[in-house]
Image (tube, rainbow, N blue to C red):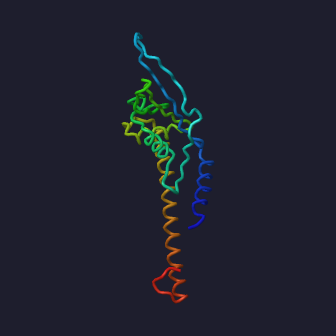
Amino acid sequence: MFGQASEAVRVCREEMSEDRGAGRRVRVSSTSWLWEEGREDPVIKYDWSDEEGREVGACASYGETPWGVAWELMENSGVVFASSSSWHRGLWYSSEAQQDMRSGWVEEESFHLAGFTVAEEYLVWLAFGGKRARLGLKLWLQVQANRAKWGLLSWAWDVRDEVEHRIRKVRRGLRSRRLGVRGGLV
């Protein structure tokens, strides 16, 4: 049990290094605008809040997938809609615009996926409730392979943890019988 987490991290790093899409990141940009009196158009500023991006590694032992981690990060950051109502490569996801009442500036954050495969970007789109799109056979197979790969790995880790738990339980029972202890954990 002790050291199991460090082993899981080591194995997850190995999985990520073997994976083609290692180095997945979620980059954050911001758009701010201000309506000034006497002007028809607002003053607009575009900037990167986090241009390098936050790495979203995943670990099958915790039941995580790369697109699930990215979705959770964006969901917790307040993302409410995608840049388009139909799926295509390169979509970004935006938060609700918020206004600073003192300065009057309105700011909206946008989240951009970087380093994800096309299939993984599609799975993020589905996680946000996007409509299923007609995919070419090759892309459809990649999506199914991603689902199977990460689903199989998480299932294998669950089975491994269950087997280890049962082995520990049996060892505890044998040890307590050998020591003559009843009903207590040693």
181, above or below 65, in the image: below
| x and y percentages locating residue 120 in the rendered image | 49, 41
| x and y percentages locating residue 128 in the rendered image | 40, 40
Q: Residue furthest front?
A: 102
| x and y percentages locating residue 137 in the rendered image | 46, 38
Identified at 40% across, 13% down, the residue is 37
Identified at 44% across, 29% down, the residue is 108
Q: Nearer the viewer, residue 130 or 119?
A: 130
| x and y percentages locating residue 155 in the rendered image | 48, 58
Identified at 55% across, 29% down, the residue is 48
For the N terminus, which image quadrant? bottom right
Identified at 52% across, 33% down, the residue is 28
Q: Nearer the viewer, residue 150 or 169?
A: 169
142, above or below 92, in the image: below
Q: Residue furthest bottom?
A: 180
59, above or below 170, in the image: above
Across the whole image, how many numbered discs are drawn on residues? 0
Q: Is residue 175 left or right of residue 87?
A: right
Q: Nearer the viewer, residue 65 or 186?
A: 186
